[in-house]
Amino acid sequence: MLVFRLFGRQFLVGLAVLIGLTVILGAVYPAAVWGISRVVSAKAEGSKVTDRNGCVVGSGLLGIDPKAPKGAPDPYLHARVVGSADDPFATGDPSASAASQQGPNSEKLLGWINARRTAIAAREGVSPERVPADAVTGPGSGLDPDISIAYARLQAPRIARVTGMSLERVRAIIDEHTSGRQLGFLGQPRVNVLKVNVGLGLVAATCQ
């Protein structure tokens, strides 16, 4: 009888702990985190980016590289490699994000980088040596929404020429969507590609 009594007591204690932790960790804690996120963070809904009409066109945290129709003038600010990094000229589909798994000594990766550098230099009308490193390499996630200031400024003359805007206006829009180092010392200053394209009036959506 003593054994059963001890077992019953342990069973009830264990059941009480299970129920208590389920309530705390399965309901109270998630509800508290959800509530705090709505109060202190503007990014809780995915950092939505809207166009001039207030329609959502994407997220400020996900890289999108818009493509001009084949043979048409290219007015867009372009991102880094977006999508599957196994494609040297990735399609820009965020759902296909992946790392290339190619190391620094990979001949295949070197070939991709050289091909990208040549293509970007031709698109921007500059020498290959002027193409910055982030333009020809992809992030591990394949979803980087930002580019370096150097890459953004490299593209500014083409954007101005195709859109008919002044170069000063294009640079001002780029500067408007440039962020500094995180906490003042982490990382590098960066330009959000989607927000610049929205600011240029090149990205719009139909509100649902």
Image (cartoon, rainbow, N blue to C red):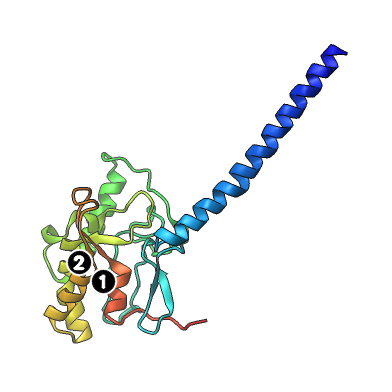
Pointer 2: residues within 10 angstroms few (<14), some, or many (20+)? many
Find the residue positioned furthest to the top: 2
Q: Which mark is residue 152?
A: 2
Total numbered labels = 2
- In the rendered image, residue 138, in percent from the top left (x then y), is placed at 31, 53
> Which amino acid does the dot numbered 2 rest on?
Ala
Is the residue 59 above or below the residue 70 in the image?
Answer: above
Q: Judging from the image, what secondary structure is the residue with disc 1 in?
A: loop
Residue 43 screen position, x and y as percent:
40, 62
Which quarter of the figure is the N terminus placed in? top right
Q: Is residue 87 left or right of residue 182?
A: right
Residue displayed at 37% across by 79% down: 51
Can residue 74 be seen in this snapshot?
Answer: no
Residue at the (79%, 17%) spot, across then down: 6
- Is 108 above or below relative to 65? above
Residue 162, how many percent across, how many down?
21, 83
* Residue identifier under label 1: 77
Asked if labels 2 and 1 touch by Cβ distance under 8 angstroms, the answer is yes
Q: Earlier in the sequence, mark 1 or mark 2?
A: 1
Residue at disc 2, secondary structure: helix
Q: Nearer the viewer, residue 172 or 138?
A: 172
Seen at 17% across and 57% down, the residue is 132
Mark 1–mark 2 distance (CA, rounded to whole Å) = 7 Å
- Quarter of image, res 147: bottom left
In this view, the residue farthest toward the right is 1
The kind of residue on which mark 1 rests is Leu
Looking at the image, can residue 119 be seen? yes
Label 1: few (<14), some (14–19) or many (≥20) C-alpha neighbours in 10 Å = many
